[in-house]
Amino acid sequence: RLVTPAMLRCGVEGVARGCVLAALGDAVEVRDVRREELERADEIVVTNAVRGAQPVHRIGARDYATGPWAARLAAVLAA
């Protein structure tokens, strides 16, 4: 399941994020994301209009694998 934070308190509703939301629609859940969820996540990907979809490899001492969402989001942004 793909979750993106709601941009109610911080962040930027950028072009890349908009493309992902438009392309994937109901496959994306937009809501508040708690730090504990990030710590339990299998994969974290950030998007940017210039850099595309970039997998997050580490936050603090926690390593993250590059999973299927990185490739899927890269394909959406390349289209």
Image (tube, helix red, strand yellow):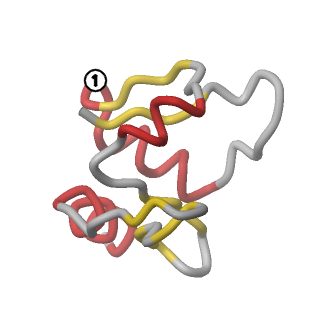
Q: Quadrant of residue 40?
A: top left
Image height check: is 22 above or below 60?
above
Look at label 1 and name its amino acid: Asp
Label 1, on which residue? 26
Which is nearer the eye, 35 or 48?
Answer: 35
Percent of width and height locating residue 2:
32, 37
The C terminus lies in quadrant? bottom left
Q: Residue at x 56, y 27 (%)?
A: 33
- Check disc 1 and report its element: helix, strand or loop: helix
Image height check: is 55 above or below 41?
below
Q: Residue at x 76, y 46 (%)?
A: 12
Percent of width and height locating residue 76:
31, 61
Which is nearer the eye, 29 or 24?
Answer: 29
Which is nearer the eye, 55 or 20?
Answer: 55
Q: Quadrant of residue 64?
A: bottom left
Crowdedness of circle 1 by 10 Å Cα count: few (<14), some, many (20+)?
Answer: few
Image height check: is 23 above or below 30?
below
